[in-house]
Image (spheres, helix red, strand yellow):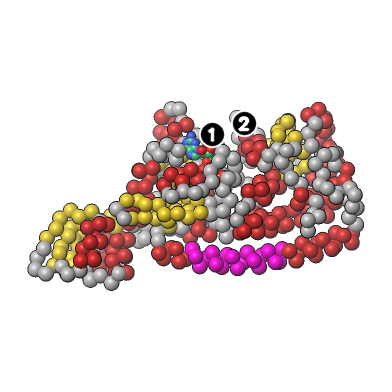
Amino acid sequence: MSQLPREQLKVAAERAILVKVILPGVYFDEHDPFRELQALAETAGARVVGQLIQRRRKPRGRTYLGKGKVEELTQLAEMTEATLIIFDNDLSPAQIRELEEATSRKIIDRSELILDIFANRATTHMAKIQVEIAQLEYTYPRLRAMWDHLGQIVGGAPVGIGTRGPGEQQIEIDRRLVQRRLRLLKSELNDLQDRKFREVQQRNLDHYTVGLVGYTNAGKSTFFNQVTAGGAFSHDKLFATLSTRIERWELGGGNHVMLSDTVGFIHNLPHHLIASFRSTLEETVHAQLLIILIDAADPNAEMHLRTVVSTLDEIGAVDQPRIIALNKIDLLERNTDVMLWLNRHPESVPISAASGQGIEELSQRVFGHLLGGVREVVVSIPLTDGKTLDFLEKRTEVLDRQYPTGKAELRVRMGRRHVDLLLARGAQFTLDGMPPMDVITKLWPNPPSVETQRTPPHAEY
Ligand SMILES: Nc1nc2c(ncn2[C@@H]2O[C@H](COP(=O)(O)OP(=O)(O)OP(=O)(O)O)[C@@H](O)[C@H]2O)c(=O)[nH]1
Ligand SMILES: [Mg+2]
C-alpha cells in the first residue's frame, strides 16, 4: 500500500502553476478567477509561481487545454521552474497522463488538491479513515493510467518511482490489496457510523441541537469558540476543521442548546468526498436547527450561500429550519453592503464572530426556535407542586401570579418546548383552563418549528 505512487503525490513545498479553463455557464470569480484555487494551493503548502487561463466552448478531449496553450504552459513551467501544475477543472486519468507527458511536470486537479489538504489535516480516527477511503476511490482508478510514465516526471516524484518498473503483475497485486484495504476501512467506518448515529439520536432526545454550517473559512469555528467553552481550531486557511465538535451553548435563563461545528463546504466538491464525509456530517443532518454562516465580506458570498444550500440538499439536511448569519460584518466598510444583503435575505442576522457584535440577536433567534414559538398562557398547577412552580419561575417569563385556593395560576410567556418538558416530567397542569393536550395544537399549530424560516423563496437556489 505504501507504494501507491499517486497517493504520495504531495503538494507541500512544490513550485506550482495554476491553470483554469473557463467553460460557458460555469461559475467563476470574474475579478479574481484564481482566488480560491490559490488559497487551496497555499493551504496545501505549495508556492504559486504562475497562472494560466483559457476560455473554451468545451474542453479539448485529450488535454483539456488547447494545443497552443499546452505549449505555453510548458514554457511557463520551464521559465518559472515549476514542478507542479494544478488544474481548477477535474481531469480524467488519460488527460492527466497526456498533460504530464507534454509538460514533463506533475499534474493534479482540484479534487486531488482538496484530498491532499484533507489528508494533511485529518486528525481524528474517523476523519483519517474517511480521507483514506476517498483517496483510494479517487486515486486508485488513476493508478493504472499513471504508472507507466511517472518515472519521467521532473521533480517531486516519490521515492521508488522510476527504480521500480511496475509491470502488469505488480498492478494486479496492488489492485487486490487496494480492494481488500477498502473493504476493511469501509467496514470499520460502518461500525463507527452506527455508533455515531446512536449518539446523535440520543443527543437529540436529551437536548435541542443546532448545527453550524457554512463555506470553508466563513468563521464557523471562531463563532463556535465565542459562544461555547470552545476548543475548536480556527485558522485563516481553508479546511481548518475536518471533524465535528459539539459543545453547550448557554442561551440564558437556564436554557441551552448543543451546538456543532464541522467541516466547511466548498463548491464542486466531488460527490464521493461528500459521501465519505457523511459520518462527520451526521450531526448536521439531524440537527434540529441550522445556522448557515456566510462570510459577508467575501466577494463570492452569494455563490457560497448557493453551495451551502445545495450541499445541505445533497446530504439530506432539508427538514430543519435555517437561520442565515452574515459573518465578518466588521470587515464591511460600508453599511450599504449589509443593507444589500438584508434586502436579499431579510431574515438574516448580521454578526461578527470575532468581535461578538450581533451574537446576542442571533442567540435570541435561536432561543425562539428552541422554545418553538413563545405564547402568553395561564398555567394552573397545584400549590404543592414546588418543582413545577420553580421551573416556571426560572425558565419562563412570569407576567402575573394568582393564588386561588390550593392552586397557583401564573400568566407566563412560554414556548412549546417548555410544555413538552413539563409533560415529560409528569407535571399536572392546565393551560388556559384546559388539559395541555387539548390546546397544544391550537396554540402551536406547526410544532416543533413554528417560526420556521427557510431560505426566502425569492432567492435563486
Ligand atoms: N474580521 C473577522 N475575521 C473573522 C471573523 N470570524 C472569523 N474570522 C477569521 O476568519 C478565518 C477563518 O475562521 P474559522 O473560524 O477558522 O473559519 P471556519 O469556517 O471554521 O473554517 P474551516 O474550518 O476552514 O471551514 C480566521 O482567520 C478567523 O480569525 C469575523 O467576524 N471578523
Ligand atoms: Mg472551522
Q: Is residue 282 left or right of residue 417?
A: right
Neighbour tally class for label 2: few under 14, some 14-19, many 20 plus, Cα within 10 Å:
few
Confirm whether the magenta stretch covers residue 191.
Answer: yes
* Quadrant housing residue 329: top left
Magenta segment, which residues? 182-200
Q: Position of residue 189 (x, y in %)?
A: 63, 64
Magenta stretch secondary structure, dominant: helix
Q: Residue at x 9, y 65 (%)?
A: 404
Q: What amino acid type should be assigned to the residue bearing mark 1? A: Pro
Relative to 27, residue 391 above or below = below
Residue 246 is inside the magenta segment: no
Q: Badge 1: few (under 14), some or many (20 or more) residues near its Cα, within 10 Å?
A: few
Residue 279 % position (x, y): 57, 60
At x 17%, y 70%, the residue is 384
- Where's residue 220, x and y in %? 49, 45
Q: Secondary structure at mark 2?
A: loop
- The answer to whether any part of residue 26 appears in the image is yes
Residue that label 2 marks: 32
* Corner quadrant of residue 177: bottom right
Name the residue carrying label 1.
299
First reached walking from the N terminus: tag 1 or tag 2: 2
Identity of the residue drawn at 15% across and 64% down = 408
Contact? badges 1 and 2 (CB < 8 Å): yes
Q: CA distance from mark 1 to mark 2?
A: 10 Å
Let me know if residue 62 appears in the view. Answer: no
Quadrant of the image containing the N terminus: bottom right
Q: Position of residue 226 (x, y in %)?
A: 43, 44
Could you tell me the amino acid type at mark 2? Asp
Residue sitting at x 64%, y 40%: 43
Q: Is residue 419 left or right of residue 208?
A: left
Q: Secondary structure at mark 1?
A: loop
